[in-house]
Image (tube, grey):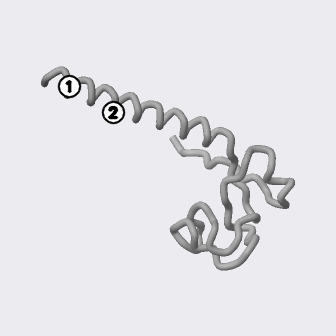
Amino acid sequence: MNLKSIAIASAVASVLALGSTSATAADAAKEKCAGVAEAGKNDCGTKDHSCAGQAKTDKDPSEWKYVPKGECEKMGGKLVKPEQKAM
C-alpha cells in the first residue's frame, strides 16, 4: 500500500467509526412507544406481521414506534419494556 491508499483507508475508517457512535447516542434519546403509530408508520413487526410500515390502523395498541424520550405518555401511548433474553 502506498501512502495515499493508507490515508484514504484511515479517513474512511474514521467516518465509519463516528457514524456508529452518533447512531448509538441518537437511539439512547428515544424509547419504544405502543399505541401512537399511525397506519403504515410503525417502526417494527408484531405478532400480526413482520415488518415496519405494515400497521393497518391508527393507534393500534400492539403497534409501536420510536419517540423522543419522555414523550410517550404525553402522546397517549404506553412504553414498551425491553425483552428479557433467556440464558
Dot 1, how many residues are within 10 Å of its Cα: few (below 14), some (14-19), or many (20+)? few
Q: Which residue is found at the position 59% from the left and 67% from the top?
A: 46
Closer to us: 13 or 48: 13
Question: Disc 1 marks which residue?
Answer: 4
Q: Which residue: 27% across, 29% down?
A: 8
Tell me where residue 37 sits by quadrant. bottom right
**18 horizontally vs 9: left or right:** right
Residue 24 pos. (x, y %): 56, 37
How far is the residue under mark 2 from the one under mark 1? 12 Å
- Give the side of residue 27 with respect to residue 74, left or right: left
Q: Residue at x 51, y 33 (%)?
A: 21
Q: Position of residue 22 (x, y in %)?
A: 54, 36
On screen, residue 12 above or below 80? above
Q: Secondary structure at mark 1?
A: helix
| Residue at figure coordinates x 42%, y 31% from the top left | 17
Judging from the image, what secondary structure is the residue with disc 2 in? helix
Residue 12 badge: 2
> For the residue carrying disc 2, how many other residues have a C-alpha within 10 Å: few (<14), some (14-19), or many (20+)?
few
* Residue 65: image location, x then y, percent: 66, 59
